[in-house]
Amino acid sequence: MTVSTLMNLTDHSRSTFYAHFNDLHEPMEAVLDLLKDEIFGAVQPWLLSGGDPVARMSETIEALVRVGYQRGPFLKAISDAAAYDTRFEKSWERFLGEFDTAGTARVRADQAQGLIEEFDPAPVVFALNRMNARTMIAAFGTRPRRRPEPVRIALAHIWVAALYGTRWASAGASDLIRK
């Protein structure tokens, strides 16, 4: 994508773009920041809430899929740009890395309470987060978008099975309690 391509989609000139931004990276990074805030808002139940972590995970995946459904084209545009531009790639990896850090901390806290078996959570959370991103980009990044419910069911099943065990994967709730 170029500034010319972007501005051809509007009624404004290139000079209008440069009155607000130094380069094409700035608006893309601003969109990433907005997406980050929206996604962190969606994942709060699992990251921060007490009670049943499996139920919180189910709530979180539902909210995350809602965001992915609404913002899929933005995620796809940024992900596609990252494949061709080093600065976008670094921004995309930083974006995903913040979710890796938060997810790893949550898994460690649940491990400390005996809710998740002991393993190194960082590579598992890394893999799960990239699975989420690729799945939502593939499902919701282009039109026609896929139905969100099967995506939600699949992601919730995989996350719960990977972290809390297959016993709870289809239930959407457990008898586990976070303190």
Image: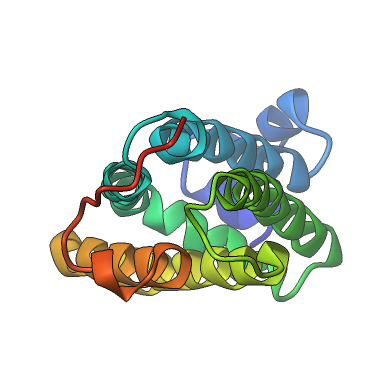
Answer left or right for 8 relative to 49.
right
Q: Residue 93: give x, y in percent of width and height.
A: 74, 60
For the image shown, how many numbered marks are present on the structure?
Answer: 0
Q: Residue 4: give x, y in percent of width and height.
A: 65, 53
At 19% across and 60% down in the image, what residue appears? 148
- Please indicate, yes or no, whether residue 142 appears anywhere in the rendered image: no
At 37% across and 44% down in the image, what residue appears? 53
Answer left or right for 165 relative to 107.
left
Q: Residue 6: give x, y in percent of width and height.
A: 57, 50
Vertical side of 168 occupied by 49: above or below:
above
Q: Quadrant of residue 17?
A: top right
Single out the residue that lies furthest toward the front.
114
- Please indicate, yes or no, whether residue 20 appears anywhere in the rendered image: yes
Assign the N terminus to one quadrant of the image.
Answer: bottom right
In this view of the protein, which residue sits in the foreground, 4 or 84? 84
In this view of the protein, which residue sits in the foreground, 21 or 79? 79
In this view of the protein, which residue sits in the foreground, 119 or 57? 119
At 39% across and 33% down in the image, what residue appears? 45
In this view of the protein, which residue sits in the foreground, 131 or 45? 45
Answer left or right for 55 relative to 121.
left
Q: How is colour applied across the structure in the image?
A: rainbow
Vertical side of 64 occupied by 170: above or below:
below
Q: Residue 97: give x, y in percent of width and height.
A: 72, 54
Single out the residue that lies furthest toward the top.
19
At 66% across and 35% down in the image, what residue appears? 30
